[in-house]
Amino acid sequence: MKICYSVLLMLTVQVCAAQKTFLFPKIKQEGNSLEQLTPSNWTIIETANGDLNNDGVNDLAVIFESTKTIDENRTYGDNNSDIIKETQKPRILAIFFKVASSNSYRLATQNNDFILREKEGGKLGDPLTQMNIKEGQLYLRFKGGAEWRWEMGYTFKFENNDWFLTSAINLYFNQNTGDMTERVYDFKTRELFTTVGNLHRRDVANRKTSEVLYFSQLRTFKTFKKPWAWEIMPDVYL
């Protein structure tokens, strides 16, 4: 009986260890340099500077990547379902407001989900193409695919103590034929502009339309899990 109990205990420990989930580090609330703000076993892969809270001082956006590869559950389709497991290095988006009086950076938000990982771009490789700050907004750009390719862009603005998605762009095209569909979303005016046609002959072959954009409320980093996770209209994902 003692032997059976010991074996059962060992199996239980092994199962619990296997089920242990990866824990993201908590970014420091304040620091004077990137070195101070970077968690252990993480590296900086992208930075952007610019005023995000309209105080006349340049703030800082940083994308950190883990040095370790893990099994990570990622969401597709919507914010709750179609979860798949991927083996990759997780990433963190951290935004810091500059405190002029102390010449330090104060953490404004940490997001562990929105930034696409290195393996999520398909044959084109790392999908992260751009992050910058201009006109008081944070711009994030991704691309991926193979023969059929996609480009996604998102613009967030800090308002009323939250980060709201103000606009987005989704371009889907065939690299060989040039056939394409481009959708530009303006969430402030609730307008959707769609262009269908050919990427190589935009002025001749393309058909442009506009329509009212229906959604319940503006999305934020908290309510918009990640790219490809918002079915904004039937069979159209943003």
Image (spheres, helix red, strand yellow):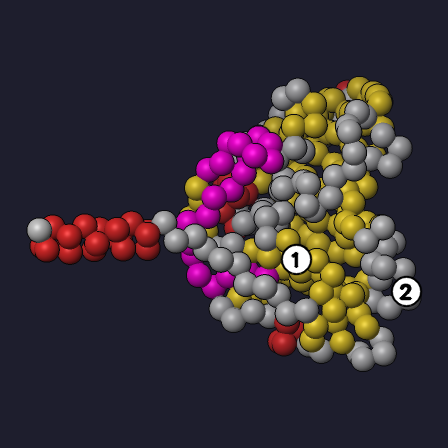
Label 1, label 2: how many angstroms apart (C-alpha)? 21 Å
Instruction: Please tell me how crowded label 1 is: few (under 14), some (14-19), or many (20+) other residues with Cα within 10 Å.
Output: some
- Quarter of the picture containing the C terminus is top right
Q: Nearer the viewer, residue 177 or 173?
A: 173
154 over 18 or under it: above or below: above
* Residue at 68 percent of width and 41 percent of height: 223
* Residue at 70 percent of width and 72 percent of height: 30
Secondary structure found at label 1:
strand
Q: Nearer the viewer, residue 134 or 223?
A: 223
Residue 27, image x and y in percent? Answer: 62, 65
* Residue at 29 percent of width and 49 percent of height: 15
75 part of magenta stretch: yes
Secondary structure found at label 2:
loop
Name the residue type under label 1.
Answer: Gln
* Residue at 80 percent of width and 78 percent of height: 103
Q: Which region is colored magenta?
A: 64-84
Residue 12, image x and y in percent? Answer: 26, 51
| 101 to the left or right of 117 | right
Q: Is residue 131 visible?
A: yes
99 over 86 or under it: above or below: below
Residue 34, image x and y in percent? Answer: 66, 73
| 219 to the left or right of 74 | right
Q: Residue 30 shows which numbered tag?
A: none
> Which residue is disc 1 drawn over?
110
- Label located before the other in sequence (1 or 2): 2
Quarter-of-image position of residue 100: bottom right
Name the residue type under label 2.
Answer: Asp
Residue sticking out furthest to the front: 1
Q: Is residue 48 visible?
A: no
Residue 108, image x and y in percent? Answer: 74, 61
> Which residue is disc 2 drawn over?
55
